[in-house]
Image (tube, rainbow, N blue to C red):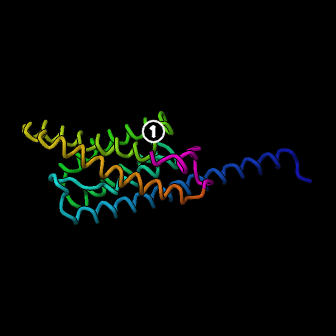
Amino acid sequence: METRNARDTRIYKGKIMRKNAYVLHRLAAVGILTAMSLIAFVVESMFPPLFVPGAKIGFSNLFSLIALVLWSPAEACAVFLCRTLLGGLIFGNAASMAYSLAAGGVALAVSSLLLYGAFPRIGFVSVSVCAAIVHNLVQNAIFCAMSGVPQAWIYLPYLVMLGAISGTAVGAAGVWIVRALPERIYEKTLRPLRSDAST
């Protein structure tokens, strides 16, 4: 007959094993999202800029947003940092990596505040649009400050327009992916996203 101490030890070990499996599952999922984000970043880098020098749709940011919805800002930040640093190493462009780290970090912070503070009053696509616009504005501000060329602010209307377009595209893709995922993988209950995210 199993003693109380043996039973307590078995339960404790079971909890440890489940926790370890949970952590490994989370790390694997973050790794997959990071790989997909990096692939999107590399593929997008092969195409010419849109309207404004260096401007892109930014589909690589989609996977950070997915991590933000599925888990928390910590996992989203991990996907973002790994993709940005690895992308910078692949292309060897330190200046571009610095711009991306600063602008992407601010955009991710805005996304986190809106998603966990204003959702579902503000839909997922709207969060993506705001993040994309902020990303473009921060990058342009950093470029103006570092280059001493304030004339670059002339691109402001185009950056806002491009942010709205790219944010809508990324947000719509994110809504489609999240709705297709089973609810059991959610860490936080953002179930209204499945029916209310398109605003």
Spot occupied by residue 100 in the image (x, y as percentages of width and height): 26, 47
Q: Write down the residue under mark 1.
A: 122
Q: Residue at x 18, y 37 (%)?
A: 141
Spot occupied by residue 3 in the image (x, y as percentages of width and height): 88, 48
In this rendering, the answer to whether 58 lies above or below 128 is below
Residue extent of the magenta highlight: 183-199
Picture quadrant of residue 73 = top left
Q: Quadrant of the N terminus?
A: bottom right
Q: Which amino acid, by three-letter code, is at mark 1?
A: Ile
In this rendering, the answer to whether 145 lies above or below 175 is above
- How dense is the environment of label 1, judged by Cα within 10 Å: few (below 14), some, or many (20 and up)? some
Side of 168 relative to 68 (left or right)? left
Spot occupied by residue 9 in the image (x, y as percentages of width and height): 77, 48
Q: Residue at x 54, y 60 (%)?
A: 180
Q: Nearer the viewer, residue 183 or 9?
A: 183
Spot occupied by residue 176 in the image (x, y as percentages of width and height): 47, 58
Q: Nearer the viewer, residue 59 or 168?
A: 168
Q: Residue 81 colored magenta?
A: no
Q: Quadrant of the C terminus?
A: top left
Name of the residue lying farthest toward the right: 1
Q: Residue at x 37, y 42 (%)?
A: 108
In this rendering, the answer to whether 22 lies above or below 160 is below
Q: Residue 197 colored magenta?
A: yes
